[in-house]
Image (cartoon, rainbow, N blue to C red):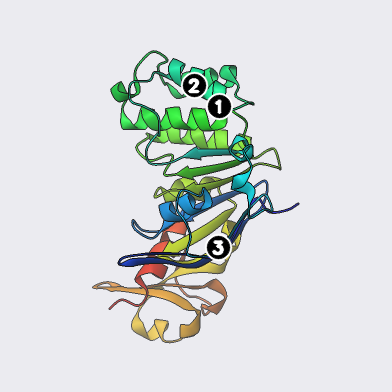
Amino acid sequence: MEPVLELTDVTKRFKGFTLDRVSFTLPAGCIMGFIGENGAGKSTTIKLVLGLLHKDAGSVRLFGREDYLTDKRAFEEIGVVLDETGLHDSLTPRDVNAVLSRIYGAWNPDRFFSLCAKLGVPEKKRIKELSGGTKRKLSIAAALAHDPKLLLLDEATSGLDPVVRDELLDLFLEFIQDETHSILLSSHILSDLEKACDYIAFLHQGKLVFAQRKDLLLETYAVFKGGEAELSKIDPARVRGVRRNQFGVEALAERAALPRGTVMDNATIEDIMLFYARGQQQ
């Protein structure tokens, strides 16, 4: 099956920041977690995919086509949640249903109101009266209500309590049971991504560090704990980052490179991101 989304050497230059030759592929039927520090370029990348920003170089292919967004039916197959709802503050969810049902041919009012009820979004309150978290839940309900094939979610779970986040992850996992569906999910809540994602793409200072299967990352790396003498026995080429403190040394290293008997912990996605980002630290 053709990938849902392919970025090849995508570049965008701003004053003081460059998104530099970003390349990754999102297969159908998968969730890709998109991670990186604030300002790494995650939101910029999503906006480039949507054509909200003009790229300086590279290519974006959606559903196998570079010209996909020129098709007037394109956004029928894409559901989007950005930092802002994009909906006027004076609207209520009932108004949102009336507006979006005219835009999306596949809009399903029953699905929309069912999701609003499940997520605790009141139908009659104006958007300006909703909390930030409830606005985000409204955006998610709207993104899912027209049965898209691709969800692009920028910090969709931020500001939500753990119970609601868990419900959303279940929704996302249910969504990709259809093997033609995929999700690109940007989030700072890395524990959520570890639960739900098949792939992890990591941006750092505008550059893509890796885009790999989550299970492979977790199998490959471990967090070494010990002293300098023990660290010196590990091939430096297979160490991704070191953190030193008054108690000793921690390092993210390839599990296979650690000598037998080494004290280690399983690496989390957060460990991998932090050690890669910090690199060698004294």
Q: Residue furthest right?
A: 1
How far apart are the alpha carbons under marks 3 and 2?
A: 37 Å
Question: Which numbered marker is on residue 103?
Answer: 1
Residue 249 visible at all? no
The answer for how far apart the CA atoms under marks 1 and 3 are is 34 Å
Q: Residue at x 55, y 63 (%)?
A: 211
Q: Give the class, few, some or many, for how many residues have Cα within 10 Å of label 1's Cα (few <14, many ≥20).
A: few
Q: Relative to 280, is 203 above or below?
A: above
Label of residue 211 in the image: 3
Residue 101 in the image, given as x and y percentages of width and height: 56, 21
Residue under numbered circle 2? 99
Tell me which numbered mark, 1 or 3, is placed earlier along the sequence. 1
Q: Is residue 157 left or right of residue 201?
A: left
In the depicted structure, whether residue 91 falls above or below residue 1 = above
Mark 1, mark 3: which one is toward the viewer? 1
Report whether 147 appears left or right of 100.
Answer: right
